[in-house]
Amino acid sequence: MYRSLRLITLPIAFLGVLAPAAFHLPNAARAHAKSAALFPVTIRDDTGYKTTIPRKPKRIISLDPRDTETLFALDLEKRVVADGGKEVEFAACCKKRFRYPAQWPSPWGRNYPMKAPRLPHIEGGYDAAHPFDIELVEKKRPNLVVSLNSDQQGIDKMRQVGLKVVVLDPHTFAQIEHDIKLIGRITGNIGEARTVLRNIAGRYHRLLKQLSGIHRRPRVFYEIDDSSGTPYTACAGSFIDQMLTQDKAVNVAHNVTPCPAADPYPQMSTEALVKANPQVILLGDSNYGVTPAQVRARSGWQTISAVRHNRIYRFDDDLVSRAGPREIIGMEKVARLIHPKAFKSAH
């Protein structure tokens, strides 16, 4: 697992060397021959576990909606035979079909893909009390299981019965890029991974150009969950922290402690917030009913600049909580909320 904070530069590094071209074959057959020649492939996943994939997987299970989206982005829709639990899916929105991977990330930035809700769901895996349904996983006869970093006992059991399990756990831009490349390698869709990363890099550099005239960085507080009365936020080492830095803002929770590298989402007290005095508040928990009016009514928050100047914004946390291709969409939308004047002339 990566531990260091690495701000994104989004280089499009190619993934190894493709096999020599198979001449005198139709295009589809030639592409198949190239991808098949990449196997066996041995990798280490985000937990450091070493896995060898002997041949191109034809039946893939994704145990997290984050990874389902990345798999679809790499044009692997027809090979995904099941995905994560229905309770965390919410993967339906758009009637218009996407072209993978040429149109990825999607311009809508909503939950997707269209087919995902119709896939069989592997329930569980959120915590020790709700383990993965390993029996159902086995019934789907997968050549590859892409898992979130949860229910280690269940992951061990799947490996014990011979399943190839690759655990992904990205927290930063660099890790997201790494995992997109990794999925390309273990599925044989290296070219598709390149295309997706090229699309992300193009949008990233356009965003930087739009923000090039910004010189004052506002102080921003990103709220993930206030259900306990002491809001959870994102500190150094998280995607959200990096996103705010790239969006030319200062994350007021950057130095909050403790800030564990494996889970950089601490709580921040009212006293600390008042002292930090954020100029903008982003409500990542607005999907769960939290409103700007409720924030303005919180005890002790009335002196905060964002409250006094009415700069409290609802934000769709799905755009930044699923660490995959959609993160660039979240980054763009946050930038528009923080620096609206920079986008007034943009079409």
Image (tube, rainbow, N blue to C red):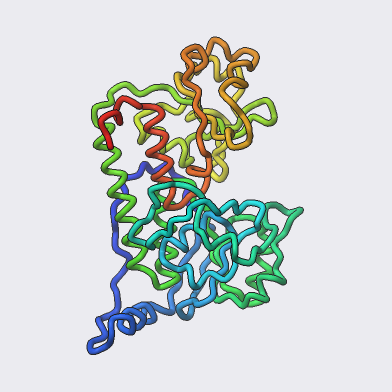
Depicted 58 relative to depicted 320: above or below: below
Residue 284 position in % (x across, y down): 54, 34
Depicted 244 relative to depicted 86: above or below: above
Image quadrant where residue 214 sits: top left
Residue 4 position in % (x across, y down): 44, 44
* Residue placed furthest toward the top: 303
Depicted 210 relative to depicted 271: above or below: below
> Which quadrant would the C terminus be assigned to in this image?
top left
Residue 340 position in % (x across, y down): 35, 27
Viewed as shown, does residue 104 lie left or right of 165?
A: left
Image quadrant where residue 249 sits: top left
* Residue shown at 45% from the left, 70% from the top: 186
Viewed as shown, does residue 2 lie left or right of 122?
A: left
* Residue shown at 59% from the left, 55% from the top: 149
Q: Which of 343 and 147 is in front in this view?
A: 343
Viewed as shown, does residue 327 lie left or right of 269?
A: left
Residue 90 position in % (x across, y down): 59, 51
Depicted 143 relative to depicted 62: above or below: below
Image quadrant where residue 163 sits: bottom right
* Residue shown at 41% from the left, 38% from the top: 242
